[in-house]
Image: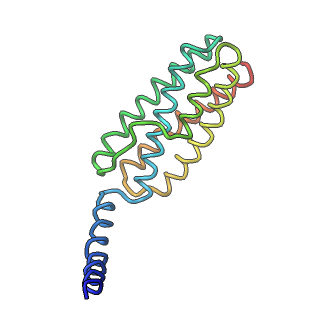
């Protein structure tokens, strides 16, 4: 009898409590696409800023150091623009970079001089291609008008970063 009673209580809890927990987890003003985009964009901004700081210290060429400083500045501005949108939509953006990006940061932070310059340029081309693709997709996928405008307004800067990174990669 006790087992039957516990089973009934557990089943009732599963039907009453679990759906409420799922609703609470989904209680946000943002669509799933909006929230996902904001989290990935925040991660990319933090990564580019950290790598830019490393470039300022570890790069050999002044042009690579300058590019790193630009990444800190431009991605810092983008992060500052994204934050109030995330707050408005009740989306918590990450405060630490993803483990994938942390591996890149760890790998590049161990390099110095010409070796760093090459690896950093390669990483910037790869990362900016990925981020541009994400922002272009977001233009069609995100629902919030302000977030869509953020994606549209940020995209030209990201494309400029890619162009500069490709020049840096080719040694220009």
Quadrant of residue 63 in the image? Answer: top right
Q: Say above or below: 126 vs 53.
A: below
- Pick the residue in front: 123 or 157: 123
Count all numbered tags in the image, as a single digit: 0
Quadrant of residue 2 in the image? Answer: bottom left
Residue shown at 49% from the left, 52% from the top: 139
Q: Quadrant of the N terminus?
A: bottom left
Left or right: 85 as drawn, with respect to 109: left
Q: Quadrant of the C terminus?
A: top right
- Pick the residue in front: 132 or 104: 104
Residue shown at 73% from the left, 19% from the top: 171
Measured as percent of width and height from the top left, residue 163 is found at 64, 30
Quadrant of residue 10 in the image? Answer: bottom left
Left or right: 74 as drawn, with respect to 121: left
Left or right: 68 as drawn, with respect to 165: left
Measured as percent of width and height from the top left, residue 75 is found at 46, 30
Q: How is this picture coloured?
A: rainbow
Measured as percent of width and height from the top left, residue 115 is found at 70, 18
Measured as percent of width and height from the top left, residue 88 is found at 27, 48
- Pick the residue in front: 83 or 14: 14
């Amino acid at each position: 009898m006790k087992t039957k009673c516990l089973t009934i209580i557990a089943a009732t809890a599963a039907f009453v409590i679990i759906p409420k927990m799922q609703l609470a987890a989904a209680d946000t003003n943002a669509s799933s696409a909006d929230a996902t985009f904001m989290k990935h964009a925040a991660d990319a901004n933090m990564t580019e800023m950290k790598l830019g700081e490393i470039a300022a210290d570890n790069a050999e060429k002044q042009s690579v150091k300058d590019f790193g400083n630009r990444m800190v500045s431009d991605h810092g501005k983008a992060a500052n623009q994204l934050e109030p949108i995330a707050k408005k939509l009740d989306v918590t953006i990450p405060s630490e970079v993803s483990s994938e990006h942390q591996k890149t940061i760890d790998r590049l932070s161990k390099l110095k001089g010409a070796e760093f310059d090459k690896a950093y340029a390669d990483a910037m081309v790869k990362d900016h291609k990925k981020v541009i693709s994400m922002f272009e997709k977001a233009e069609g996928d995100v629902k919030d008008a302000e977030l869509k405008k953020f994606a549209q307004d940020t995209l030209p800067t990201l494309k400029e970063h890619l162009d500069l990174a490709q020049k840096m990669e080719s040694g220009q």
